[in-house]
Image: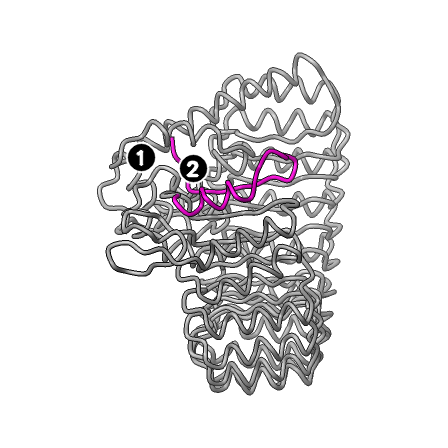
Amino acid sequence: MSHNYGYFDHDNRSQDPEDIAFALSVNRKMSVFSIDGNLGVDGIDILARELTRDHVQNAQKEYFLSISHHQRPITSIGFPSYDHYNTIVPALAMNSTISLIDLYGIEIGFEGARKLAMTLKENKTISTIDLRYNNIGPRGAEQLASALVGNKTISNISLQGNNIGSFGAEKLSSALMVNKSVGYIDLEGNNINDEGTKSLAAALNVNKTISTIMLGRNNIGAEGAKVLAAVLKTNKAISSIKLWQNKIGPEGAEKLASTLAVNNTIECFDISENNIGPEGATKLASVLKVNNTVSSIDLSKNNIGVEGADKLAVALALNNTISVIDISENDIGCAGVGKIASALTVNNKISKIYLYKNRIGYIGALKLASAIKENKTLSSIGLAYNFVGDTGAGALADALATNNTISWIDLDDNIIFDDGAVKLATALQTNNTINDISLFDNNIGIDGFKAFALALTNNQTITAIKLGNEEHGFYEDSIKQSLDKNRGRLVQMLFQKTLNCQDVSTLQKGDSEEIASFMKNILHLTRSVEEIEKVIQMANKTLRHKLVTIIIHAIAPFSPLLSRLLYDKVALYLSIHDFNIYRPWLDNIHVVTMVHN
């Protein structure tokens, strides 16, 4: 069995850089090269030479790992420290295969940014750069901006946590006015403030390629929100904007709300942790009644209170596009959640709702339980840290016993004892859709564990349960055995669906979501890829092609992180020709995973 990954660990002292370099020069499979540990200065120099060494074959000069048209070239490279980076990055200027560089957290500083900028001015293949937490500062951002001006290949760049300030934002903005390749940019945690935001707004007024911009933790106030709102009214490219943990307040929220009233491209809108209060929530709610493009909105940690929840509930009763909403930590209490619950009885779109830390109590849980009985679309509900107690857990259990849409529910830290746990376990004896239930940090004893062990002897859908750190011997083992059996059953169901699927690209959305759910059950909830990798190894070429197309068309839209993980596993067994066919998609999905990290 051959693999397309290279990994060198500092704990293995027998690894000789000369041997590694020679192996790389003739390797015909590896596409991802990761250096972990201390190869020494000489070793790094040797590897750097290999990255630019010319090979002559059939009267043609080709660069590192491209010595044969049959070969799969290295396309990604990462560094654990600046020592490795300092020598190898300049060598990439002439490399013609690497498209992704991972430099997360190695502290390259201004000098490292300068060297990278020089490389990017020459390199013609790098499309994705992860530069998060590298302390490049304002001047480092200026260096990178100079490279972006003429660069035509970089489409995704992450500069989170680099303290570039308003000066760095200004320099990058100037570059983005002329750059026509960057589609994703992450500037979170850079203290760009309102002045830097004004520069970015000016760039977005001209730029037509950026679709995702991340501006969280930047000390942006109402004035910055105002200039962004103005440009977003006419910008037709941005589909995702994240402004979490700034200082936008109710005034800034009002300006952004006015944008959503006319903008028809923004789908993902994150304004969490901005203290917009009930006033800001009211302004946004009035717009969400008519907006028909926003599908995901995060309003958590905004002190909207009962009043804000009331206004949002009215909007949600009318809105038919929002499928994911986060209202966590807003002190809405049982009264506020009651309003939201009423909206859920008529809303036919929301599939995921998060209500963590809202002090809803058992009364709020009763209201939600009533809504769950009528709602037909909810698939995920987060209720951790809400003091629902045994009474609330019992009411939710009664609703879940007959519900056929919810697959995940989080009830962590809710003062639930054995009585509530037994009722929830009893619900699982008839419920056939829940696959993940979390009850961590409650007060569940042996009776609760016994009830869940009994319920799982017949339940075939649950693949993950968190009941806490308590050890209850036989019952704990029984639960584990039942979960393993259910996971194995899901693997078989998934692959049967895969085999039966004739044309994955024409799958209906509901089918895609179902397949994505199956994949998530197997991988995300089991916290292991061993089961699916075994099946992939045994699969024939046709089935592997179907798996890749399912990952691209059915899973990526709903779970980019999961799709990347799956693809990395399947790609190990693809032919070189097939790998190259799917490579552009692989490079692109890496960017989406950075958004979720």
Q: CA distance from mark 2 to mark 1?
A: 10 Å
| Picture quarter with the N terminus | top left
Residue 206 in sight: yes
Q: Is residue 278 visible?
A: no
* SS at circle 2: helix
Figure check: 79 above or below 137: above
The disc placed on residue 7 is none
Q: Is residue 359 above or below residue 222?
A: above
Tag 2: amino acid: Phe
Determine the residue positioned at 73% across, 53% down.
358
The tag earlier along the polypeptide, 2 or 1, is 1
Note whether 306 is above or below 512 in the view shown: below
Name the residue carrying label 2: 518
Horizontal side, residue 398 vs residue 218: left or right: left
Q: Check disc 1 and report the residue beneath it.
A: 497
Q: Residue 110 at x, y = what percent?
A: 68, 72
**Which color scheme did the rendering employ for the protein?**
one colour
Residue extending furthest toward the top: 474
- C-beta proximity under 8 Å, tags 2 and 1: yes
Residue 578, x across and y down, in percent: 29, 46
Count of marks placed on residues:
2
Specify start and end residues of the magenta stretch as a single range: 1-26
Tell me the quadrant of the picture where the C terminus can be found: bottom right
Q: Nearer the viewer, residue 326 or 469?
A: 469
Looking at the rendered structure, the kind of residue marked 1 is Lys
Examine the structure image and report whether residue 6 is included in the region drawn in magenta.
yes
Callout 1: helix, strand or loop? helix
Disc 1 residue crowd, few under 14, some 14–19, many 20+, Cα 10 Å: few
